[in-house]
Image (tube, rainbow, N blue to C red):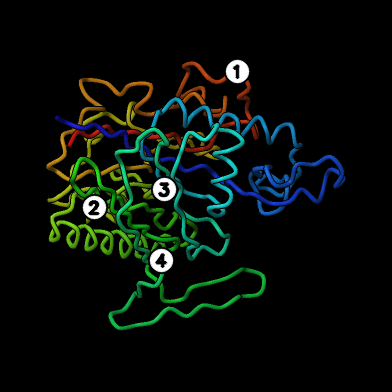
Amino acid sequence: MATQVRLTTFNLENLFNRYAFLDMPWENRDFERFVQSVGVVSLASRRGDLVSYPITEIQRNNTALAILDAQPDVLVVQEIENIYTLRNFNDTYLNHYFGHILSIDGNDPRGIDVGLLIKRSRTDITIEQIRTHIDDSEKKGGTVKRQSVPGFGYTAAGAVFSRDCLEVDLNVAGKVLTVMANHLKAQDSKPKTSDARRKLQADRVAAVVNAAVAENKLPVVMGDMNVDAQAKNGKTINALVKHPELRDPYAGFPKKQAWTHYYDSEDSVSRLDYILPHKSLKVITPAGASVGDTDIVRKGLTTKAIKHYDGPRYGTVGPVNTEASDHCPVTVTVEL
């Protein structure tokens, strides 16, 4: 009997869990259950200005709605502060939708990590083994030097991964599905350096894929690759999107259907988020001539993206600080 699994990746855009010191008194505050807004200090946007507690609640409720609309059996997330944050978010906003939650602190100086969650009702999906790659060195036989740099943060010089490639073996219907949760190097003001770093990371993930295949496992690469494969610098992830053992279920769709990220400052969209299952896995969705509403959930996007998406949105989504994320949950359903 065939078993289907819905695999979803979602960059939650700075899901932090930090005490609210700045805008409200200690009294009557539920600090332990408060899942933080975006930013580097409590209740602050990425620009550093304060965001009210009610707005924070609205934003994270919309994040939860986007996840629930995607209906994942296995969810890979990026830009989360730690496993404690994920547990609180699952409790406060998702009514314990997930039963198993994994995350390991990575190499990012902002403290953002990757994680993996499994739907509580999917008791047939069990965790066999977990591997981290935070200590993978850029050079063979090299080491990772960790130190705190004043004015910047904690660094991991010599590490391949900016965050981690969290590798999780899942037993599904007697077969091993090896999920590789990733958040590759972002594009920045130094494209030559960042593109080279992203390519190094993609090449390393490709080697992990090869190792999984050699052990008769079924690899699935998931996450925010931080570049559109069709863009000029998209070749930096060729080792993954063109890997002979993987397939890209969204490759055949036009950009207007397959984009996953909205870039506010340029009012542009691109495809940054990928799910690349092993070629032997039958892909159930997306299927046909179009991408469905639950394949890529865009109802949590800011209203600023109206030129690119004029479909339905959650009732509390506005232009600023209420969107679910600047990314969309992306789902692929596979059959074993």
Q: Residue at x 37, y 47 (%)?
A: 223
Q: Residues within 10 Å of mark 4 (few under 14, many from 20)?
A: few
Q: Marks 1 and 4: which is nearer the front? A: 1
Q: Tell which circle, 3 or 2, labels the residue nearer the N-terminal end.
A: 3
Above/below status of 146 relative to 286: below
* Quadrant including the C terminus: top left
Q: CA distance from mark 3 to mark 1?
A: 28 Å
Query: Do callouts 1 and 4 mark residues in contact (Cβ within 8 Å)?
Result: no
* Residue 118 screen position, x and y as percent: 39, 41
Q: Residues within 10 Å of mark 3 (few under 14, many from 20)?
A: many
Residue where numbered disc 1 is placed: 315
Query: Do callouts 3 and 1 mark residues in contact (Cβ within 8 Å)?
Result: no
Above/below status of 69 relative to 209: above
Residue where numbered disc 2 is placed: 240
- Secondary structure under tag 3 reads strand
Q: CA distance from mark 2 to mark 1?
A: 37 Å
Determine the residue located farthest toward the front in the rendered image. 123
Amino acid on which disc 4 is placed: Thr
